Image (cartoon, rainbow, N blue to C red):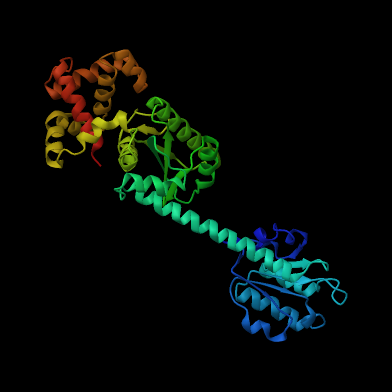
Amino acid sequence: MGMTIGDALCIPPLEQCTVIAGKKGLDRMISSINSYDAPDVINWLKQGDLVLTTGYVFKNDEQTQIKVIEEMAKRNCAGLGIKINSELETLPEVMIRIADDNHVPLIKIPYHLSLSDMILSIFREMFARQDLNDAENRKKAFLSKLLQGEYHGRDAVLAEGRTFGLVPGQYVCLCLRGNNTNSDISGLADSICERSGISLILQEKEELTMILQAPKDQDGQQIYDQAFQVAKSLIDEAGNTFPNLVLKAGIGTCQDDVLRISDSCKQAQEALQLGKKQRGTSSDNIYHFNSLEAYAVLQHIPESVLESFIANKLGAIMQHDKDNHSDLMKTLEVYLLSRGRTSDAARLLGVHRNTIGPRLTKIKELLELDIENGEVVFQLQLALHLFQLQD
């Protein structure tokens, strides 16, 4: 976790300093700090340097003033802080202009501030951030191994995980994935997790995974409800913040063994994959593995068997739709979902109910089957589900 010039200027006593120029460069990262008053310092400047000086060496030398700023810009230095004193009461206009042109932060340091105190404060903050970064990396490594099922000792994983908030109980994994990898939802996720008391969260590439915990004696439905509410809150807030982002969530099953958290994670990821292939299974873009488990079984059918079954049951309709640009497959699917109620099917399809009859007649003619027969209905629904599972 690095520190920018803008970050540094929020630290006491640096908050007493003033940015005179180069405000567009406040996001420059600080990697080191130098204090100088020697004329040859330019030769030693490097990327990320925050340079603090009394300005004595260039107070009356406009060429040096210009050269310092230009070289700092060329070497991508972080910024230049100049301490105001009796011999340099205002910063030179030429430095202000060049700093603005090159987006190099030019900072006025009050006379009463000690440069050594400023340097010490910045180093303390940098070390604190590094410690925090190290802790976050350790947590990320732990969660990554936990979710991938790389731990085998129950006591060992609980002992290591206690540092990060893992406790014995019940666990449900929630996975979220968006259609836009440029939208960083980690800040929103952190805020929602903090409000919900969730401390175990891992973001890797475009996927965000949370582990929700509950006491062993808590009703399992309550933890499912919490997972749903967290997912819905994040999806809603992300949609408001990133209008082009479509966020989807998968929820795994509840596990009471810490070593099976990885199972819940895999199920949540699988629910996401299966949910994308289903129509009408979730109006909230939130998919429960429990609701899709049958599809998880079906997708393991060999491709050749799957294709043969679909072709035998639906091939005639598929060919008719292709040749005539019709949509009898959709009509059949909705009709079966409506349990044979033509008025409900018409409403879902957005057509007049009188148009459903001729479509059903054509479907029966093509299939040469009684689509009112229970066994036939089962086989057709199975074929439709398998068709949706195809990539």
Query: Residue 244 in the image: x percent, y percent?
Result: 49, 43
In the shown orientation, is residue 77 left or right of residue 362?
right
Identified at 13% across, 33% down, the residue is 309
Pick the front one: 200 or 231: 200
Query: Residue 109 in the image: x percent, y percent?
Result: 78, 67
Using the rendered image of the protein, determine whether residue 9 is visible from the camera's viewpoint: yes
State how many labels appear. Answer: 0
Pick the front one: 206 or 24: 206
Taking the view exactly as shown, the residue that stands out farthest to the bottom is: 40
Identified at 78% across, 81% down, the residue is 58
Identified at 35% across, 45% down, the residue is 155
Location of the N terminus (image quadrant): bottom right
Q: Quadrant of residue 191?
A: top right
- When the figure is inspected, residue 368 is found, relative to residue 227, above or below; the finding is above
Using the rendered image of the protein, determine whether residue 1 is visible from the camera's viewpoint: no
Pick the front one: 219 or 246: 219
- When the figure is inspected, residue 313 is found, relative to residue 68, above or below; the finding is above
Query: Residue 216 in the image: x percent, y percent?
Result: 38, 30
Identified at 37% across, 21% down, the residue is 350
Q: Quadrant of residue 324?
A: top left
